[in-house]
């Protein structure tokens, strides 16, 4: 067993921050979803969108459907990935999709034409003929995709960092001055610098000293702090006595 | 009272000394009148020349308290590496703020030293403070 004292930038942060942020946002979005006026209408058109296979429809529809499927692919793989070792990231992944759905819900609510049982196909066409809707949709898909990608692949960044440090040359000791109570020595770089994180310092000093272990803890307490502690103790004692 | 020669002070510093070190007013070095001779000391410092590594051994039972030989020392302006072997079933504490157990894990456990404000205080990651020091409790002699 070994302990490493490494100080490196943790790339895992990006992934965990994204996961947790989407989790937090997702909860709000999910509640809004339940209160949305035309959610039934929306889901109808959304399902229809997914189920359409004909390619000769309008291009945006096709593009959107492709993106949705790619997004779903990452979403599902992310869920599997996370579910394997901890259940914590699952909600994060689900809420990615919640964001996705929510933005469409807003659009659905802004539609001037109410959803009727026979008009979901018409609604779908209206939806895509509105250019701002297309823009919003594209943005939503991009956001969801990026989030899903980072969340799904973020784990891979964790392991990689300190590899290149393995090939660093270390130091060699010289000029060892042994005294009665210890030693001092020079350390110099034992090969070409590896400069893995910043530059190698070419020469170091080593100091070793044998000491007694007496009174060690008393050095840490400055005198003014000791005085304060004494006063506090007296005051508190008096207050307690009178108030009780 | 008989003094107990249980302390060994090891310092590795860049030369010339440019890197920040904790000031003596906060972390005082042992005063010279508390030095003891190497023969009196209960601990022993030994080293390998190239690549440089060192061991700290408790003389009474040859217990290895610190051994940096597994990997070479790295001393860079943005990175330090000093690796030590741990005894079997070690009791490790310290190394910054986190939401894990007080006694640190020792199997595949990474403790990142990097201050950050972390939403939700997730397990297994670093938090606001980082303190590059650890304490390892070992079996008592008597």
Image (cartoon, grey):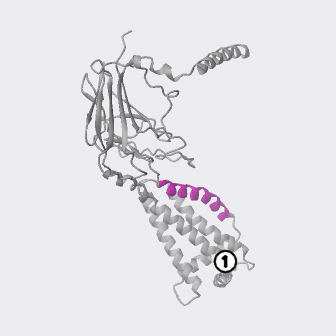
From this view, report whether residue B142 is shown above or below residue B63: above
Q: Is residue A60 visible?
A: yes
Q: Is residue A24 magenta?
A: yes
Residue found farthest to the right: A112
Going 57% across and 47% down the picture, which residue do you hit? B117
Side of B44 relative to A81 (left or right): left
Chain bearing tag 1 is: A
Residue found farthest to the bottom: A56
User: Judging from the image, what secondary structure is the residue with disc 1 in?
Assistant: helix
Residue A36 location, x and y as percent? 69, 67
Side of A223 relative to A114 (left or right): left
Q: Nearer the viewer, residue A138 or A167?
A: A167
Residue A44 location, x and y as percent? 61, 76
Q: Nearer the viewer, residue B45 or A110?
A: B45
Main secondary-structure element of the magenta-colored stretch: helix
Q: Which residues are magenta?
A: A12-34
Going 45% across and 53% down the picture, which residue do you hit? A86
Q: Is residue A87 visible?
A: no
Q: Nearer the viewer, residue A54 or A64?
A: A64
Going 35% across and 21% down the picture, which residue do you hit? B6
């Amino acid at each position: 067993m070994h302990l490493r004292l490494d100080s490196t930038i943790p790339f895992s942060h990006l992934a965990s921050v994204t996961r947790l942020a989407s989790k937090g946002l997702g909860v709000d979005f999910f509640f809004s979803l339940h209160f949305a006026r035309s959610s039934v209408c929306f889901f109808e058109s959304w399902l229809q969108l997914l189920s359409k296979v004909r390619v000769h429809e309008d291009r945006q529809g096709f593009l959107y459907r492709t993106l949705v499927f790619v997004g779903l692919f990452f979403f599902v793989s992310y869920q599997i990935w996370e579910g394997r070792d901890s259940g914590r990231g699952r909600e994060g992944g689900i809420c990615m999709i919640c964001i996705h759905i929510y933005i469409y819900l807003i659009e659905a609510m802004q539609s001037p034409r109410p959803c009727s049982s026979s008009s979901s196909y018409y609604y779908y066409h209206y939806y895509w003929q509105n250019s701002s809707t297309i823009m919003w949709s594209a943005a939503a898909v991009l956001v969801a995709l990026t989030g899903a990608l980072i969340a799904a692949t973020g784990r891979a960044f964790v392991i990689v960092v300190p590899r290149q440090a393995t090939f660093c040359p270390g130091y060699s000791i010289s000029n060892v001055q042994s005294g009665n109570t210890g030693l001092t020595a020079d350390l110099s770089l034992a090969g070409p610098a590896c400069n893995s994180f910043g530059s190698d310092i070419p020469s170091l000093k080593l100091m070793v000293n044998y000491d007694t272990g007496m009174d060690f803890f008393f050095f840490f307490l400055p005198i003014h702090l000791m005085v304060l502690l004494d006063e506090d103790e007296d005051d508190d004692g008096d207050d307690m006595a009178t108030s009780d | 009272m008989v003094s107990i020669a249980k302390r060994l002070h090891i310092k590795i510093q860049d030369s010339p000394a440019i890197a920040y070190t904790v000031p003596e007013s906060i972390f005082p070095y042992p005063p010279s009148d508390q030095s003891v001779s190497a023969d009196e000391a209960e601990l022993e410092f030994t080293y390998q020349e190239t690549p440089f590594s060192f061991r700290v051994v408790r003389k009474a039972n040859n217990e290895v308290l610190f051994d940096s030989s597994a990997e070479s020392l790295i001393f860079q302006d943005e990175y330090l590496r000093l690796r030590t072997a741990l005894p079997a079933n070690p009791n490790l504490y310290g190394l910054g703020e986190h939401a894990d157990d007080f006694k640190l894990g020792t199997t595949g456990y990474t403790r990142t030293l990097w201050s950050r404000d972390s939403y939700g205080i997730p397990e297994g990651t670093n938090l606001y403070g980082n303190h590059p020091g650890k304490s390892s409790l070992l079996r008592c002699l008597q």
